[in-house]
Image: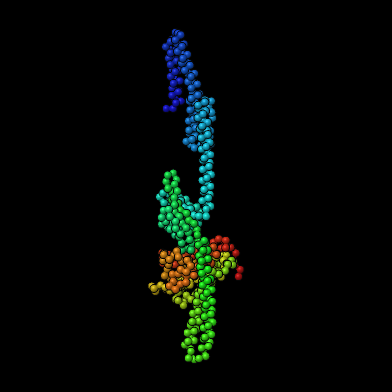
Amino acid sequence: MRIKSYFTLLVIFLLALGGVLLYTAKGTLTRHLYLTEGVVLLILLFLLLFYRKIVKPMNSIGSGMELLREQDFSSRLSTVGQYEADRIVNIFNRMMEQLKSERLRLREQNNFLDLLIQASPMGVIVTTLNGEVSEVNPMALRILGLHKEEVTGRLLRDIRSPLAAELAALPKDKDAVVRLNDANIYRCTRSSFIDRGFPHPFYLIERMTEEVMRAEKRAYGKVIRMIAHEVNNSTAGIISTLDTIEETLSVDPDMNDICEVMRVCTDRCHSMSNFITRFADVVKIPEPQFAPTLLNNLAAACVRFMEGMCNDRGISLQLQCVPAVRTVRMDAALMEQVLVNIIKNAAESIGQTTDGRPGKIVVSVPDATTVEVTDNGIGISREAEPKLFTPFFSTKPNGQGIGLVLIREILSRHECTFSLRTCNNGLTRFRITFNGNPAERHATPPTA
């Protein structure tokens, strides 16, 4: 029961007591009765003063406690004219002012951190204690290639993304450099922060593709230029000497065998020079000259160019295109070189199969900005996928490891997203998607 109720009961009791005394006197007014009634009246007056000085301030403080419980830090209590109570009211008002300022500061700080995370060039993924994704910033969504509803509330291992699988396998408080089958490289970190006494796991994803590619290009470019200089200088002198010797010996019919050996050595020197020149071409890729181009036309031209080679190997080369309504800005010559290399790699992959099935390559344009090359060749192992676009790595026995590097360089300059992998159905698919400023879509068709 509240103190106000006790006060009310006491007033009722005193009034009842005064009424009983008057009733029992029955008209006999004595000095004791007057004295008793006066005492009761004084007590009532004192209780009224007590209510104003004690109970009313306590009610005001109680209202302040309600405001505090409801976290309404903008309201303030008024003074009641009682010294002790006003001291409590002033302390309470100062406390509410400090709480309001602290809340505002925390809100501004949280808002600043939210904006910072949203604008961060690093991907940030926060998970619950159960491992479910609770927060994810736009950069992480862009890296994963998914929408927020496809990520939030899911375990990392259940998210359909190769990078999410790598994150799920990352040990606690560790970081790792992850290479994917789309030539992208990421530094992934798993850590945690303490909130309300509990550790909350989070992941940081830093894109390192451009930095690593620049470092790789500087490294292999310097090596290639040095080797090309030495080899070309040496082979030029050797070829000149062999030609001179062959020309001198050719007048003697008995020297035909030796001349044939000389010609073989000369051809071998030319092959070596061409071999190293191909490496040098990777370093000297020209800057793309962008122009509106229909992917359908580009794919059709490449299929016509490679049909002869595929027919000679007994490989079916097919073209599947949807009606194109937009163009893509690209360097058609460089992109033709990319598609030709991809089709050639697919044909060579089919040549390595041993099950005797008929080879098939399908070049498809599912939409105006995407082109795919699918083959039923030997496929790519999961172990080899992260190394595909690494310089000098090849899955072919006699491969040089520069074809995919050349493709990577050209597609990167076009700001394309791409991937190469063998799907669960056994088909190997190279997918290229144009996006970004160089690949702007245009509604007007190209002029003839």
Query: Where in the figure is residue 413, as x and y percent of width and height?
Result: 55, 64
Query: Where in the figure is residue 57, as x and y percent of width and height?
Result: 50, 27
Which residue is farthest left? 355
- Above or below 306: residue 325: above
**Residue in front for this viewpoint, 359 or 138:** 138
Asked if one can make out residue 171 in the rendered structure from this viewpoint, the answer is: yes
Q: Quadrant of the N terminus?
A: top left
- Above or below 75: residue 259: below
Residue visible at 51% across and 51% down in the picture = 117
Query: Where in the figure is residue 104, as x and y percent of width and height?
Result: 53, 41
- Above or below 72: residue 132: below
Q: What colour scheme was applied to this rendering of the protein?
A: rainbow
**Residue in front for this viewpoint, 304 or 160:** 160
Query: Where in the figure is residue 335, as x and y percent of width and height?
Result: 54, 68
Asked if one can make out residue 127 in the rendered structure from this viewpoint, the answer is: no
Residue visible at 44% across and 26% down in the picture = 3
Q: Quadrant of the C terminus?
A: bottom right
**Residue in front for this viewpoint, 271 or 443:** 271
